[in-house]
Amino acid sequence: MTGDGDGERSERKAPAVFLERQTYRRRRLMDAARLLPVLGALLFAVPLLWPGAEDAGTAAPVPTSRAIRYIFVVWALLILGNVWFGLLTRGWSGQGQGRNDDEAEPPQRERG
Amino acid sequence: MATLNLMVLVCLAYVALLFIVAFAADRLAATGRSTWLRSPLVYTLSLSIYCTAWTFYGAVGYAARSGLEYVTIYLGPTLVMVGWWWGLRKLVRVGRSQRVTSIADLISSRYGKSNLLAICVTVLAVVGITPYIALQLQSITLSFSIFFEEAPVGAYSDASVVFWVAAGLAVFAILFGTRNLDANERHHGVVTAIALEAVVKLIALLAVGIFVVWGLSGGVSETMARIDASPIGEWKVNGSRWATITFLAVAAFVCLPRMFQVMVVENDDERHLRTAAWAFPTYLLLISLFVVPIAVVGLEVMPEGSNPDMFVLTVPLSQGRETLAMLSFLGGFSSATSMVIVAAMALSTMVSNHLVMPIWLSSQSDRASVSGDVRHVILLARRVSIAVIMALGYFYFRLSGGGAALASIGLISFAGIAQILPALVGGLFWRGATRSGALAGLTVGFALWLYTLLLPGLGGGLMPDWVLSDGPFGIGWLRPQALFGIQGLDPIVHAVMWSMLLNTAAFCAASLLSFPSPLERLQGAQFVNVFDHSAGPRGWTGSVAQSEDLMIMSQRILGAREAQDLFQSEAALQGGRGHLPEPTPLFLERLERELSGSVGAAAAHAMIGQIVGGSSVSVEDLLAVADESAQLMEYSSQLEVKSGELARTAKQLREANEKLTQISLQKDAFLGQISHELRTPMTSIRAFSEILRDNDGLNTQDKVRYATIIHDEALRLTRLLDDLLDLSVLENGQVSLNMRDGILAEVLDRAVASALAGAEASLAVRRRRISETVQVRSDLDRLAQVFINLIANAQKYCDAPNPELTISVHDVGGQAVVDFIDNGSGIPAEVQSTVFEKFFRVNAEKAGGAGLGLAISREIMLRLGGDIVYLPGQSGGAFRVTLPLAGQMAAQ
């Protein structure tokens, strides 16, 4: 972090090709926030792969207690992930900041 | 023993508490001291109306029947909340910036404020939610009946209980849900009461769960062992149902009118989402944590055949825990009532805004401008709507008989509401989504849902059995539960798959094929790019017609005095006391007329609309404003062009005038000079000819002398006249030039020879012949004339003891430059600029010529495409002649 100090200062004069480290981190954090529901959906879809009681398969069906543990642990982890994201973004609620930081990646926007 | 009376008492006390809380919260909010009412905690708790009696009682029953599948109902909303940054945040921002009042309003607003769409969504919502409300009534009735079974009393009847419950809920919803008209104002009272109920139901369910796990089973591991040993001890969830119901829960969580109401409309601060994003999933997790243990223990301890939907209530009762049962009852009661109240409120807003008011307004079209009582009408419409919705729920419950058919209505209802999802998500994220697309998608989805799920699911003869088994008119691939011949799917999965698939397909196809109106495109841009268009989190502001605002605006436009006069006269006309009149329609009309005189009709309309807030500024208004300003700009630019033209013309005229004056002056001076120049020789000619005539005694010598003088003077006159003629011809451009190629040295030779011929004073001419071998294309005789003139001048005026003239030739930039520099004193600086004027002579005494030589030379050089200038800063008099080289003329 400190090692980048000089480089950033000299880069700041030129048109910004690269974002500042902090802004960059924020963007990636928002990417993570966007990916979190996808991860959650995937994890919650894992039970689809479990052998069920009706399947005349070889594997023994998963006991309900284990299913409960799995689902509720994943659930709690997702909540913790959101708590963590909420804490990190607590300072962002200022006017305009949210707009510039989260939605300002130009290629994504449709203009005109 | 919990007697009936006690239970009724507790129930009434609880309702009274809710009333007090709601009332106090409303009062607090009115006085503005309600900071904790706007806390993220209250917001999160209000979201818990997602958990209805279907959750509170039904989840356990669901688990007892199908194992863990119940949890999908809560995983869906968890995923939505986890992805809040991506989705809900946008929805809330749009809802706030567009001031939407319901999901129907949002959809209609996105697609060009189309009321037809709003009606579609409203009808869909009413059809989908009414059975759901009936389900809540059923759960309350069931829970009552549990207690009545414990203490049988003869006068009990389901019908009367349900009636009174429905009536009571309607009263509550009317009292606190339709207090203030502006739906943007929060219903603080209702929201606070809901938050309280959320706490009650969570505590109740947790209490029952803790009692079951630690009280009856003896700990977590023992409970887990019991679960594995129970009939639902093995994983037997149907994968397609698992995925479908999770998706349905996602869709319903976003699209349910009551969820939209608490999540978007009642949202005080966008930042509350940040807290709710983790707090609400936690709430859901806690709610569903003990569902399986309660179900398993219920299956064990309760007798065969008892309703698993009531395990939450019956398990504590069977163990003799009346207080716990009472708490549990209150929890269930809370779940049902909060859902019903908010759903009724949300639906009534939609019904009154999109169904009743348009009809009423169109029926009143002739008197619409004079009726000032619209607020009353709207409030009345809302109240009646609530009553009607509750009545619908009640009758639905009565007609359906409250049997098992109702139990599955939750998912059916979800599937119906989910039909809004494509239009909603498409509207938020795709600018190309159009009204036609939304309409097509909704219609297709709604029809398919009715056909494949609602009608077959309701039973009761709404759809004949032969249609189910053979399809309408015997067409097999149209069978409601096996569309296109695909059989064997679970009915819910089948219906959701086909309806959502075809809904989305119709939505996309119609959107791609249709063309949106300007308003739609504007709204589309505002919705999709809401973070570019709206400021950050901020509160709502009321928009009431303000005479003061109108006054300020009018002063800006009309001028202070005029505006004050106008307002005062209107106030006097209205008979008011103050200086400000009431903003009556008449006055607004007059004001608009006044303003339109200044800023144009459309702009005036838009401005007044903005302040009064009654009518929003339509795109047509904006277009008209743009039109007017475009016309103004066009006009002013035309004016600018014309004034520029005028200025140019005036300048040209001024210049022409100056030139004329100058020419006139020049002419006068010229005439004066001419007459002077003519008179001098004429005078001597006349004098000497008179002497010759009058004096007879002149000797021959004198005669000859006088005749010579007369002859010389006549010659001089002739020369002068020749020169004048030459100059005039040159100046008028009538001269014909004899252009040919030649060597500059030859021209110079000729000029030097003829200029020095017969001269008494000797002038040494220095030349560098090498540089003179330059080919020029010119009128060589005229050029020689110029050179002769310059050499003669040097000879005449050079005042050095040994006069010397240096002639040097250079090639500068494709032009031949011939410099004539003598070693005399040169021409004084102050007359250098006038040396080429006509009749100019450096000193009159030495004047031999008429002073036209240089003027003629310059005219000649200009005609020949060159120039002649005086070269200042040389040792003596210096002239520079520039002339084009051969071959350069053609290029010019």
Image (spheres, rainbow, N blue to C red):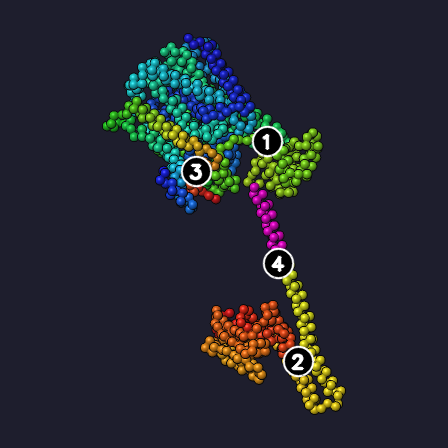
Do marks 3 and 1 share a chain?
no
User: Which residue is denoted by mark 4 in the rendering?
Assistant: B648
Q: Residues within 10 Å of mark 2 (few under 14, many from 20)?
A: some
| Magenta residues, start to end | B622-646
Q: Residues within 10 Å of mark 3 (few under 14, many from 20)?
A: some
- Please identify the dominant SS of the magenta region: helix
Read off the chain for label 3: A
Please report whichever mark, 1 or 4, sits nearer to the chain's N-terminal start: 1
Residue name at image x 46 percent, y 33 percent: A93
User: Which residue is denoted by mark 1 in the rendering?
Assistant: B544
Residue A101: mark in rendering: 3
Classify residue B617 by image quadrant: top right
Closest to the observer: B522 or B344?
Answer: B522
Residue name at image x 55 percent, y 69 percent: B872
**Disc 1, SS:** loop
Residue name at image x 72 percent, y 82 percent: B686
